[in-house]
Image (tube, coloured by chain):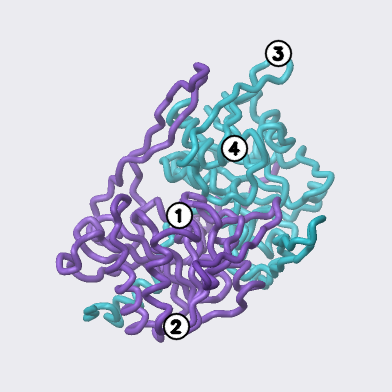
Chain colours: A cyan, B purple
């Protein structure tokens, strides 16, 4: 397979390297990734500044293209200009889970979504840990997952958001196909003073408030690899029906 | 009503001023907006840098808070810290339509979506023009729309993406409740050389390829004010059913 790799932790991130090592033996693998960390950028694209591209080497070998933009920029630029069509786009392996509301803020997921928008299958891979992350099993999982289901994913042009628990492989309970949790995050702002006595704020989130078993948040917490198929239509069809049924805006005049 | 205004064109944008002027006579209006233009940032949030807040005056009067972040940051910071709970969040009036795939990239829409995530109703207002934009009618439309349907919107905690054609009001054909188009954009990258002979790329999009009448893209083009209720669950339920029915990942072992 011809595979494009990207991420939001930047081209030098360990998780990207783990993906590359797991896949390069069997597949034709290309890397186009942000030159610096771009997490929490959501589905941002760069239209008011030009994009720069640098060729990155590791030792003697060409490693990939570093782009001065977001993950979604990388996917567009790769597929339109730098690489051309591929069979599959994989984004990750992200340091930290991308489940629940965080999917909206995630650069990792947005890269896979962008692939789907452009008509290509995409996988977003994240691991549920921030410190001392072991990407070894996750890399092997992706390799094996593609070997088993690559044809199915390509045929159905699926975009899958995959989260992997940071557990010893024998403690992982299996795979669960689950919806994205929409439960609120516990968020807060911490107000601090700088060295000149001026106020600034740090934005933080503690945890999800989700309790439903059929969601990515809870399945991941319970030790499952979670898989959520992703789409990019933000229309609320339930509310579309409500508005049409109530004929609410129909006779509006100014 | 207690209303929070924000946008992605920045706190000094004409569209925000038009909203303020249209609403401040009848409502308690607060402004928390990015200090600089933040369009195409999608649902980005700022977690790796602190946020700064400046109080902005217009003449002798306090105008609002300028935040060193994205539209989604502004909504969070306003509701959690600077203002507290409000009845309604309105984002805009954006210079340029936010329909179809562009909804994913839109900072304007993401601010209204963020309101909904936090449990508040939100409106994203955009006008379909970039040059010599007349915000006068759009401002009056928002005022009148809230007067007529404010209660309904609050009761149902709706998040509505509203696009207004840039036409003489008597040429506007009415309101259409429509879904977000998911048709591809015609996109391109333009490769140029800088003054040192180095390559850079501009990212551009020409137009939508949509043809379906029941979409925001076509209804707006046909002279209607479009209203699309927005949700923030990216799960593809059609594909969830497919994966569950085919039991495709069930017997996966590494």
Mark 1 to mark 4: distance in Å?
A: 33 Å
Circle 4 is placed at which residue position? A146
Q: Residue at x 67, y 58 (%)?
A: B51
Closer to the N terminus: mark 2 or mark 1? 2
The residue most toward the left is B171
Q: CA distance from mark 3 to mark 2?
A: 65 Å
Same-chain status of marks 2 and 1: yes
Q: Residues under labels 4 and 2: Cα distance? A: 56 Å
Give the alpha-carbon distance from disc 3 to disc 1, as whole Å. 41 Å
The numbered mark, 3 or 4, whose residue comes first in the sequence reads: 3
Badge 4 sits on which subunit? A
Mark 1 belongs to chain? B
Q: Secondary structure at mark 2?
A: loop
Q: Quadrant of the C terminus of chain B?
A: top right
Q: Position of residue B145 (x, y in %)?
A: 33, 78
Q: Please give the residue where the numbered disc 3 appears in the rendered image.
A: A60
Q: Which residue is mark 1?
A: B106
Can residue B237 be seen?
no
- Say what secondary structure mark 4 lies in: helix
Q: Given contact means CB atoms under 8 Å apart, are the residues at marks 1 and 4 in contact?
A: no
Q: Nearer the viewer, mark 3 or mark 4?
A: 3
Q: Are marks 3 and 4 on the same chain?
A: yes
Question: What residue does disc 2 label?
Answer: B27
């Amino acid at each position: 397979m011809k595979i494009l790799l990207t991420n939001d932790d930047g081209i030098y991130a360990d998780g990207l390297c783990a993906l590359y090592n797991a896949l390069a033996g069997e597949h034709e693998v290309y890397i186009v990734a942000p030159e610096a960390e771009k997490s929490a950028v959501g589905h941002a694209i760069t239209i008011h500044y030009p994009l720069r591209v640098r060729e990155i080497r590791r030792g003697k070998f060409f490693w990939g293209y570093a782009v001065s933009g977001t993950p979604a920029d990388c996917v567009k630029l790769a597929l339109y200009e730098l690489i051309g069509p591929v069979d599959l786009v994989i984004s990750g392996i992200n340091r930290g889970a991308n489940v629940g509301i965080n999917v909206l803020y995630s650069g990792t997921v947005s890269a896979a979504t962008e692939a789907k928008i452009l008509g290509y299958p995409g996988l977003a891979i994240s691991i549920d840990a921030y410190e001392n992350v072991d990407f070894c099993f996750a890399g092997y999982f992706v390799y094996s997952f593609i070997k088993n289901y690559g044809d199915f994913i390509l045929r159905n042009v699926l975009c899958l958001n995959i989260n992997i628990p940071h557990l010893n492989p024998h403690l992982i309970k299996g795979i669960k196909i689950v919806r994205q949790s929409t439960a609120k995050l516990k968020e807060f702002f911490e107000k601090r003073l700088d060295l000149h006595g001026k106020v600034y704020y740090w934005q933080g989130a503690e945890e999800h408030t989700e309790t439903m078993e059929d969601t990515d948040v809870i399945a991941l917490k319970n030790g499952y690899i979670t898989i959520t198929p992703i789409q990019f239509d933000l229309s609320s069809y339930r509310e579309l029906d409500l508005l049409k049924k109530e004929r609410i805006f129909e006779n509006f005049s100014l």
